Every structure is written in structure tokens, then in C-alpha cells.
Amino acid sequence: MKSQSLFRATIIAPLAIPIWMTCFVFAAGAVTLEGVLQTTLERNPAIQEAKSGLEQAIGQRLVFRSVALPSAELGVPAGLQAGHRAGESGVKGFAVGRGSLDQVLFNMAVPPSLRRGDIEVLIAQQQLNVAVVDQLHAARLVFYAALYNRSLESIREEQRLKQEQNVATQNDRFEAGLADRSAFTSATVQASELVPQIESAHRAYQEAQLKLAEAMGIDPAKSSLPEPEGELQFVPRQLDLDSETAAALQRRADLKLARLFLRAANEDERIIAADYYPAVGGNIHGEYVPVTGIHRQGSTSKTQDFIGSEIVERAACTWRVVDNGKVGGAVLKARAAREMNQLTCRKLEANISRELPRIANDLKAIDARETSLSAASDSAEESARTVRENVASGLISPLEYRFSQNAFLTTRSGLLDAIYQHNVAIAEWGRATGRYFQFSDDTATSR
């Protein structure tokens, strides 16, 4: 019943995935973040490999439990008997049924072996959880990167068009004698500087598409690359650092896995040390003879022949007296592994207490930057609108309008970067607090 409970929890756990969609608005039929995460969960190679590891752990659990299970053997020797002894003659067929049942009566290795088998399944389950968290988080970050680079490419291209118009205007002014050649040269250089930036953003977008396809288990040679749609949005978050830190210490998958490795190492040490204690085993041996007068192998008289069926019960005790370091050395090695796992677990717990404040501080700085750039963007947009009206009235030249437009687009690119960093920090906060996944809590069943 316990193994059924563990397996059922393993199947249900990966389905409870809270997916944040508050930062996106998508068109119908687009590759949404929800679709990316769902496809990643179903088809990602790393997640599939972790699921296979869980199935293997079920069999490994039986290996650990086999110490306490009985062992039975059954054999049926048969053949022909011929020859002369004490007046007997002729050929006689025979068959003998033999059975043996061995059962451990007392062994100090049995309790830790039973617990170790349960922990093996829990370890595989948490390894699956860790793989799911890592792959979903990676897919989410790549999705953000694709949206960011596509928007950045669009802004840079719009800037380039404005700069090309500026180049044309400066050329006309130079030919008309209203400006010197340096103004035309400066405008040309500014326009050419945007070309590699546009190409870089385009390559980054294509790279994000490839990584997104890899996370979703899509073969680019057999299918088109995913096209994420939508825009990055800024949604402020109020973070409760103290409560989130306490919750992260309880629900982080990697921390749960580290604790399970510590428990497993402790049980391994107990299993090895059990060889220091005596072990008692019981055996029942039985023979069934359908006919009499059949000689035993090597018998020299009828008193040594099979007389009839028999059952023999016995018990044996074994106790290691001289070790010569075989058990003691293995115990020390297992103890060293346990202490190493303990240090790793403490390090992870300490990292959580440091990582969450760092992310919270980064979010505060990013939010302040976004607020400043948002106000600057509004001001630049209003200035560009005013300049456009003055151009229509003939009060200022079109060149000043293009300069104001370029300043507005530059501010927009900075604002886009702040929004992107905000979404990345929110994703990192979700990973650090363990909010990607709702874990089953069946570790108490194996205690």
C-alpha cells in the first residue's frame, strides 16, 4: 500500500504547476507562455529522463526490501535407477520433490533497508521535481528573452528609419548650403551604428527561438521554430521577505532533494554497520518421495536410502568476530558521504537566506529605474508631440523633430530593458522561493 501511495503522488505532483500569466496579453493561436510550459513539461528530454529514473527507483526499492523477504527454492530431481544390490534387479524410474524456504529472523540491516528503499523512490521523485523546475524556469527565461529581443529589434529599426530621414535632411541642407559637411557625416555615422545593433538583436531573437524549441522538445529540422507573441509588461510586486524565506526552506525542490540524500546516506551507514551485530535466519527444508526403494547418491546401505517424505526445520546465527577493516572502512566511507551531504544541505539553506534578499533588492532597484524611465519616456513622447506640432506650424525645422523622436525611441529602449529585467527578476524570485511546482509531501511515510 505504501508503494502505491508513493507512485500515485509522483504522478499527480507534476500536474500541479502554477503558471503566472499576469504579465502577458496574447493573440489567439499564438505560442503563449502557458503553452510553452505545458509542452516543455510533456516533451522536454531532461524531464523524460527523470521520469525514467523514477521508474527505475521502483525496482531499486524492491532490492532494498529483499533483505527482509523470504527466499524459496524448488527442485525436482528425476532419473532412472539400475543395477543389482541385495537381490534387486531391473530399471526403476524415480522423481524426488525438494523445497527450501529461508527467512531472516533477526538482522539489524532490515529496518534501515526498508527505510532506504522508500527514500530511493522519494529521491527519484524529487529529482524529477528538480528537473521540472529547472527546465520550466529555463523555458520561461528564454521566452522573456525572445520577446525582449524582438521588441528591441523593432525599436532599433524604427530608430534607424528616423536616422535615415535625418541623413536625407542633412544631405539636402548640405547641398542647399544651409549646413556644413560635418553635420551630414555625423548623421550618416549615427545611422550606420544602428545596423549592427539591429542585427545583434535579430540574432539574439533567433537564438532564443532555438533554445525555446530545445526546451519544448521540438526538432528544428522537422518543425518550424516557435513564434512567441505578446509584449513584456511591468507588474509591481509586493514581497514579504520573511514569510517567503521560511516557505522556501520548506518547499524548495533542490533543498528537499539534499535532505533526502542526507537521510539516504545515514541509512546506508546503518546498513553497513549492521554487519557488526549477529544475524539469525530460519530454514525449512522438505523432500517428497513418491516411491520407496530409491537409493540416495553415495548410499552404501538401505538405511541410507529414501524411506519417505521429510521436513527439516533449523535456525542459524552468524556473528562477525574479526573485521580487518572490511566493515569499519566501509562505515567510515559512508559516514564521510553523509557529512558531505549534510554540509551541502546547510549550504543550500544558507544560500536561500542570502539569495532572496539579493533578488528583493534587485527588484527594488529595477522598479525605481522603471519608474524613472517611464516618466522620462512620457516626457520625451510629449516633447516629440510638441515638436511635431511646431513643425506643422513652421516654427522649427524637421531636423529638430527627428532629434526629439530619436531621443524618445532611445528612452523607450531603456524602458524596455528595465521591464525585461523586472520580469527576469520575478522569474528568479519564483524559482528561489519554490513557486514553480507544488510538491507532494510523502517523505513522512518512510520515516
Image (spheres, rainbow, N blue to C red):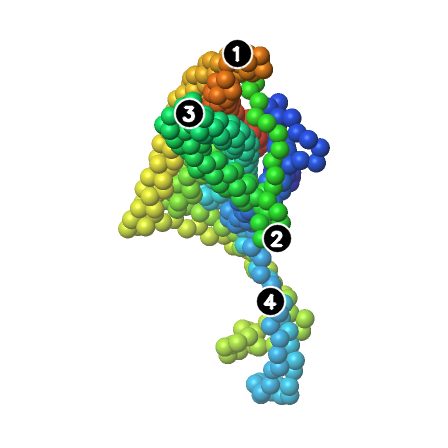
Residue 177 showing in the rendered view? yes
Name the residue that disc number 4 marks. 75
Q: Residue at x 45, y 16 (%)?
A: 369
Q: Which of 373 and 336 is in front in this view?
A: 373
Q: Which of 93 and 200 is in front in this view?
A: 200
Q: Which residue is drawn at 39% across and 45% down?
A: 272
In three-dimensional space, the C-alpha distance between marks 2 and 1, rounded to whole angstroms, equals 59 Å
* Disc nearest the viewer among 1 and 4: 1
In three-dimensional space, the C-alpha distance between marks 3 and 4, rounded to whole angstroms, equals 112 Å
Name the residue that disc number 3 marks. 177
Numbered badge on residue 222: 2
Assess disc 4: are there few (<14), some (14-19) or many (≥20) residues with their C-alpha within 10 Å of its C-alpha: few
* Disc nearest the viewer among 3 and 4: 3
Identify the element where label 2 is drawn: loop
In three-dimensional space, the C-alpha distance between marks 1 and 4, rounded to whole angstroms, equals 110 Å
Residue 225 placement: quadrant:
top right
Identify the element where label 1 is drawn: loop
In three-dimensional space, the C-alpha distance between marks 3 and 2, rounded to whole angstroms, equals 59 Å
The reply to whether dot 3 and dot 4 touch (C-beta < 8 Å) is no
Check the picture and name the quadrant holding the N terminus.
Answer: top right
Task: Kindly identify the amino acid type of the residue bearing the numbered disc 3.
Answer: Gly
- Label located before the other in sequence (1 or 4): 4
